[in-house]
């Protein structure tokens, strides 16, 4: 028996609660992991609150990320005692996830815990941080170096945004942070933003094309924000779109793409192949300032996750949330 957040859906409705459950509840998998740390991502908050149909099988343990130690393995790649992490693969959506003391998964979904990080630090990074790195890599591979101009990061005070700013600043980029919480300007500047702008400048319907400003963009917001970001990206610049915090729609015109040769990169972390994940984690180990990671991280217990999920969707959580599943 072990502790887990369990989501159920029945005649009584959709409910998430901290429960003590039996290992028999866990799905089939060839590796069993004692989870030590997990985290609360935007998608986990959607799952816990039922705000969006993230969970597609019930009962479900949410949690798209975990870090822990292998306790049992029928997979040749892993043995008891190995330190591992997991991000995505539908875990916490269709397969029981990391907001629990035990997880049973497919060995092919696991990565070795990078030696640069403790299990707690890896979860402070979590899917949000690994996605931020995927966005940075997309801009780099497009040829956007630090001298090309300003990089816009939207949803800046959130998990993806905070890690993206820390990474870009460490790599020498000039970062403009777009936020609805201008009171967080000091926090964003401490992470490395050179300028902070109010997100209202980007969130209203805009012109099909505007004055060229951004060499590159990391967008976590979607909707008009993404459309306006594309419309103000420099000739041959690029936009990495990974989020929908402001909406799933994309009310844009083709003008930036056909007149300015702007490239829009879609970023998905969930089903990213192993080599892409490995590259992102290696680069996180090299380029993420651990002091800044600590500054953006708030620690909570498993029992606090349900309340904090609501706060997160209300835009009240800054940076990243790491979950101690033993408490
Ligand atoms: P957070 O909740 O930590 O941050 C989201 C931020 O977006 C908020 O802090 C806020 O920033 C901003 N925001 C919230 N609501 C609105 C709104 N209505 N309009 C404009 N901005 C808003 O989430 P994450 O950083 O973890 O995730 C960000 C997005 O990226 C989510 O949509 C998530 O689903 C997505 N994502 C996608 C992944 C992928 O694989 N593609 C992986 C990980 C995340 P501020 O207060 O600074 O304005």
Image (cartoon, rainbow, N blue to C red):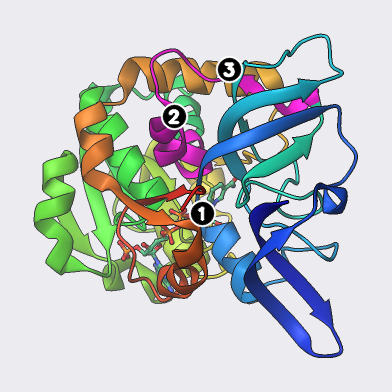
**Residue located beneath label 1 in the image:** 41
Q: Earlier in the sequence, mark 1 or mark 3?
A: 1
Quick one: label 3, few (<14), some, or many (20+) residues within 10 Å? some
The picture places residue 327, in percent across and down from the top left corner, at: 46, 53
Tell whether circle 2 marks a residue whose Cβ is less than 8 angstroms from ligand 1: no
Give the residue at x 30% y 59%.
318
Q: Is residue 108 above or below residue 102?
A: above
Helix, strand or loop at label 2? It is: helix
Give the residue at x 16% y 38%.
192
The picture places residue 151, in percent across and down from the top left corner, at: 29, 40
The picture places residue 147, in percent across and down from the top left corner, at: 22, 23
Question: Depth check: 273 or 101 in front?
Answer: 101
Q: Is residue 186 above or below residue 69?
A: below
**Residue located beneath label 3 in the image:** 278
Q: Is residue 149 above or below residue 127?
A: above
Q: Is residue 113 magenta?
A: yes
Question: Depth check: 137 or 259 in front?
Answer: 137
**Residue located beneath label 2 in the image:** 139
Quick one: label 2, few (<14), some, or many (20+) residues within 10 Å? many
Give the residue at x 36% y 58%.
155
Report the span colored magenta.
107-131
């Amino acid at each position: 028996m072990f502790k887990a957040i369990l989501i159920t859906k029945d005649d009584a409705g959709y409910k998430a609660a901290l429960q003590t459950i039996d290992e028999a509840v866990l799905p089939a998998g060839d590796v069993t992991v004692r989870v030590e740390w997990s985290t609360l991502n935007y998608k986990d908050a959607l799952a816990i609150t039922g705000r969006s149909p993230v969970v597609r099988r019930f009962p479900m343990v949410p949690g798209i990320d975990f870090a822990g130690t292998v306790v049992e393995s029928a997979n040749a790649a892993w043995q008891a005692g190995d330190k591992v992490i997991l991000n995505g693969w539908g875990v916490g959506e269709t397969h029981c996830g990391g907001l629990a003391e035990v997880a049973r998964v497919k060995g092919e979904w696991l990565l070795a815990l990078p030696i640069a990080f403790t299990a707690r630090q890896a979860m402070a990074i979590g899917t949000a941080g690994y996605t931020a790195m995927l966005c940075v890599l997309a801009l780099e591979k497009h040829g956007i170096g630090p001298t090309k101009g300003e990089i816009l990061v939207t949803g800046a005070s959130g998990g993806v945004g905070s890690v993206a700013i820390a990474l870009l600043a460490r790599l020498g980029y000039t970062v403009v942070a777009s936020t609805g919480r201008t009171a967080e300007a000091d926090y964003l500047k401490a992470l490395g933003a050179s300028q902070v702008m109010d997100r209202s400048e980007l969130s209203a319907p805009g012109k099909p094309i505007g004055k060229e400003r951004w060499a590159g963009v990391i967008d976590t917001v979607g909707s008009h924000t993404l459309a306006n970001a594309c419309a103000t990206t420099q000739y041959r610049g690029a936009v990495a779109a990974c989020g929908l915090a402001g909406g799933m729609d994309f009310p844009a015109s083709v003008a930036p793409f056909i007149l300015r040769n702007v490239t829009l990169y879609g970023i998905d972390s969930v089903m990213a192949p192993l080599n892409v994940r490995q590259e992102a984690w290696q680069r996180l180990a090299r380029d993420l300032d651990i002091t800044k990671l600590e500054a953006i991280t708030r620690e909570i217990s498993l029992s606090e996750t349900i309340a904090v999920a609501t706060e997160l969707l209300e835009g009240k959580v800054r940076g990243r949330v790491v979950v101690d599943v033993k408490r």
